[in-house]
Image: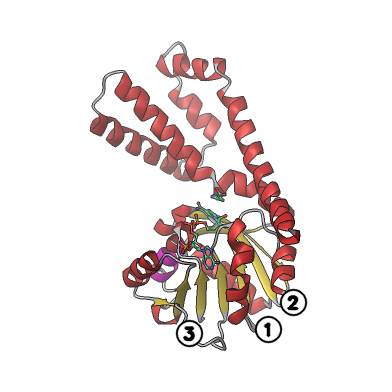
Amino acid sequence: MKTLFVGAGSMAYALLNGALEAKVLEKESVFVTNRSNGQLLTEVTNHFGVNGVHDHLPSHEPFDVIILAMKPKDFHGATPAVKRFLTSDTLIISVLAGISIKQIREALAFNGAVARAMPNTSASVGRSATAVTCNGSLSEKQREWTMKFFSSVGLAVEVPEEQMDLITAVSGSGPAYIYYVAEIIEKAAVDLGLHSELAKALIKETISGASVMLEKSGLEAEILRKNVTSPGGTTEAGISVLEQYGVSEAFTHCVDAAKNRSQEMGKELRLNRVK
Ligand SMILES: NC(=O)C1=CN([C@@H]2O[C@H](COP(=O)(O)OP(=O)(O)OC[C@H]3O[C@@H](n4cnc5c(N)ncnc54)[C@H](OP(=O)(O)O)[C@@H]3O)[C@@H](O)[C@H]2O)C=CC1
Ligand SMILES: O=C(O)[C@@H]1CCC=N1
């Protein structure tokens, strides 16, 4: 499939890395464009051996797939470029947080196929958790390709579009919550006396091991946690402090705030358009 990535940032990089490695995309058929950062575009295209689209590509160059991978606020600015490469048979795949299929259709004056997905940056190591909505007039072949594309970078599940804002808050942003916890524990370990390199190594393997346990043990997180928590022991002492500080409640608010922000970004796009 001849594919154009509009945007050459973290998400495009992660998807390219996974999909080229899995050979769902062939580098000769992949084109990448961005707005102004020529150096980054050259770095990305050289790294993957794919084609960079600067202004010289003829405007009638047709693409089977166009992947929207710019920031949501930059979507309207990118629409003229996207329209140049769009035909009625093109499949558009958007990974933009908060922007609905309807909004994409309207902005591009496009009645063809639009899929909306929410991957995460672990796509670059083939471990994304991606939610996909294929209800925007995709043919069966386009739906199958879309699922194959996202399956090549990890778990891919189809969901109704109404769940996308919440899913964005859970698994789109999710890796950042885990990195945040890693940073905090590392800081605590260093503040309390461990050497930074040792703390980093121990925390990395602890998170990685816990993740494999979640995946392979067949046990729920709650049971795994209880298995670590000896009555009257160290873990119980630690977790009771997390409870005392309202960490569980903080995470509920965290996911809710991220979901609300996703909804707001969709509204902001509408407001920017009427300005
Ligand atoms: N990062 C993440 O973890 C995730 C991000 N997403 C979504 O992916 C999208 C991209 O995010 P991310 O990769 O982090 O963003 P980045 O800021 O890393 O990259 C954005 C890219 O879009 C390009 N761009 C901006 N405007 C235009 C334009 N008018 N025409 C062409 N290219 C343009 C930028 O080019 P230039 O540098 O030249 O300005 C840049 O290459 C967002 O919509 C986000 O919601 C979804 C899931 C997870
Ligand atoms: O922070 C963001 O808006 C994007 C969407 C999900 C992850 N990163």
Q: Distance between the residues labelled 3 and 2?
A: 24 Å
Highlighted range, magenta:
15-20
230 w.r.t. 12: above or below = above
Q: Which amino acid does label 1 sit on?
A: Ser
**Within-10-Å neighbours for mark 3: few <14, some 14–19, many 20+:** few
Residue beneath the point at 51% across and 53% down: 120
Queried on whether the Cβ of the residue with tag 2 lies below 8 angstroms from ligand 1, the answer reads no
Disc nearer the start of the sequence (3/1) = 3
Q: Is mark 3 within 8 Å of ligand 1?
A: no
Q: Give the residue type that dot 3 points to.
A: Leu
Q: Name the residue under label 3.
A: 57
Closer to the eye: label 3 or 2 = 3
In the figure, is residue 171 to the left or right of 29? Answer: right
Q: Is residue 178 magenta?
A: no
Residue where numbered disc 2 is placed: 111
89 or 59: which is nearer to us? 59
| Labels 3 & 1 near each other (Cβ < 8 A) | no
Locate residue 156, reporting x and y percent: 56, 59
Number of marks in the image?
3
Q: Mark 1 points at which residue?
A: 88
Residue 23: name its quadrant.
bottom left
Mark sitting earlier along the chain (2/1): 1
